[in-house]
Image (cartoon, rainbow, N blue to C red):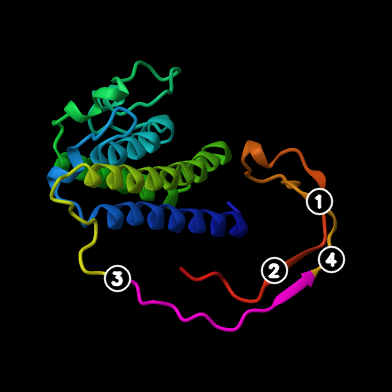
Amino acid sequence: MGSELSTDIEEIAERYRAVRTQTDRLCAPLSVEDQVVQSMPDASPTKWHRAHTTWFFETFLLKQLSGYRPFDEVFEYLFNSYYNAVGEQFPRPHRGVISRPSVSQITAYREHVDHAMIEALAENRFDSDLIDLVVLGTHHEQQHQELIATDIKHMLSQNPLEPAYLDGREAPASVATERSWTRLEGGIERVGHDGLGFCFDNELPVHDVIVPDFEIATRPVTN
């Protein structure tokens, strides 16, 4: 494999580690009890999000490699979500009743898959199509990080004790500086993905857009 592609693999592996670590950091302030609550049918427990994002990498990447042994075959049913081609899914409105596997087992599941993923990336075992799926999987996990945050917010809001996700951590107030406006000329701009590498479907096709003249403030807004 060429050095350029090897470098790309290293960058993708680093992105994988960073995204997975960010999920763990996001969940760190939560108790075990916090992670198993489903506050409404349209929300999911934090534990489920952690497992589902791991299921994605195991199902669509690791299971394509010879010799890989799944962590637990039943997880394919418990943590699938709308992927009908893969198989049946446990009903979304009832994800909160999945008290087992435990939070600690899901942590072990994540560690098992992370070890296998990093090893497979280091050994260049994924072809180009699967590498695209690694990238897609990291974006998929970032989407679920947003869902974790919103689901936690709703869950805590239902608690009469009014617990906070982070206690005693107020951001310092920003000081508004003098504001002025910079005028920029518009024109016809070409947007979209025009390369041969990975892209999302909403980046296609490449097309022209008309941008009118506009002004932008010299500083961001303050809250």
At label 4, the amino acid type is Glu
Q: Which residue is the site of mark 1? A: 190
Other residues around mark 4 within 10 Å, as few (<14) / some (14–19) / many (≥20): few
Name the outermost residue toward the bottom. Answer: 178
**Image quarter of the C terminus:** bottom left
Q: Helix, strand or loop at disc 4?
A: loop
Q: Is 176 inside the magenta-drawn segment?
A: yes
Q: Helix, strand or loop at disc 1?
A: strand
Residue 165 percent location from the top left of the image: 24, 56
Q: Which residue is the site of mark 4? A: 185
Q: Nearer the viewer, residue 189 or 123?
A: 189
- Left or right, 116 with respect to 125, comes to left
Q: Quadrant of residue 52?
A: top left
Q: Nearer the viewer, residue 182 or 209?
A: 182
Q: Nearer the viewer, mark 1 or mark 4?
A: 4
Q: Helix, strand or loop at disc 3?
A: loop
At label 3, the amino acid type is Glu
| Dot 3 and dot 2 residues touching (CB under 8 Å) | no
Looking at the rendering, the stretch of residues picked out in magenta corresponds to 171-183
At label 2, the amino acid type is Ile
For marks 1 and 3, the one nearer the N-term is 3
| Dot 3 and dot 4 residues touching (CB under 8 Å) | no
Residue 79 percent location from the top left of the image: 30, 29
Q: Which residue is the site of mark 2? A: 216
